[in-house]
Amino acid sequence: MLLALFIINLLTFFVYGLDKAKARKAQWRIPEATLLGLAVLGGSIGAWIGMKVWHHKTLHKKFKYGIPLILLAQLLLLAASFL
């Protein structure tokens, strides 16, 4: 389980970096639904770190507020699973 979470977060981090590189070169972009979907699938930490490191999607409201909300929801689900 921890290995899977590590992998999805690492993948998400690098996908955010790839999308930022493509944005700078005006190339085909990764759909926002894919970026958000990776966060929902468990990559919210990687998405949040990717946004900070790559300075990517930080002004888009659905990312600026959505990624922290997804992370919070996942942490609450994790905490609830221990009750």
Image (tube, helix red, strand yellow):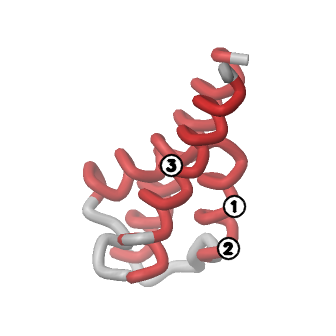
| Residue with the mark numbered 2 | 33
| Residue with the mark numbered 3 | 71
- Residue type beneath disc 3: Leu
Q: Position of residue 59 (x, y in %)?
A: 29, 80
Q: Residue at x 53, y 34 (%)?
A: 10
Alpha carbon separation for disc pair 3 and 1: 12 Å
Q: Position of residue 83 (x, y in %)?
A: 67, 23
State the residue in front, 65 or 15: 65
- Residue type beneath disc 2: Ala
Q: Residue at x 51, y 79 (%)?
A: 27
| Residue with the mark numbered 1 | 37
Please state which of the two labelled residues, at mark 3 or mark 1, is closer to the viewer: 3
Alpha carbon separation for disc pair 1 and 2: 6 Å
Q: Residue at x 49, y 60 (%)?
A: 69
Where disc 2 sits, the SS reads helix
Where disc 1 sits, the SS reads helix
Q: Position of residue 20 (x, y in %)?
A: 40, 66
Q: Position of residue 74 (x, y in %)?
A: 60, 44
Pointer 1 with pointer 2, Cβ within 8 A? yes
Q: Residues within 10 Å of mark 1 (few under 14, many from 20)?
A: some
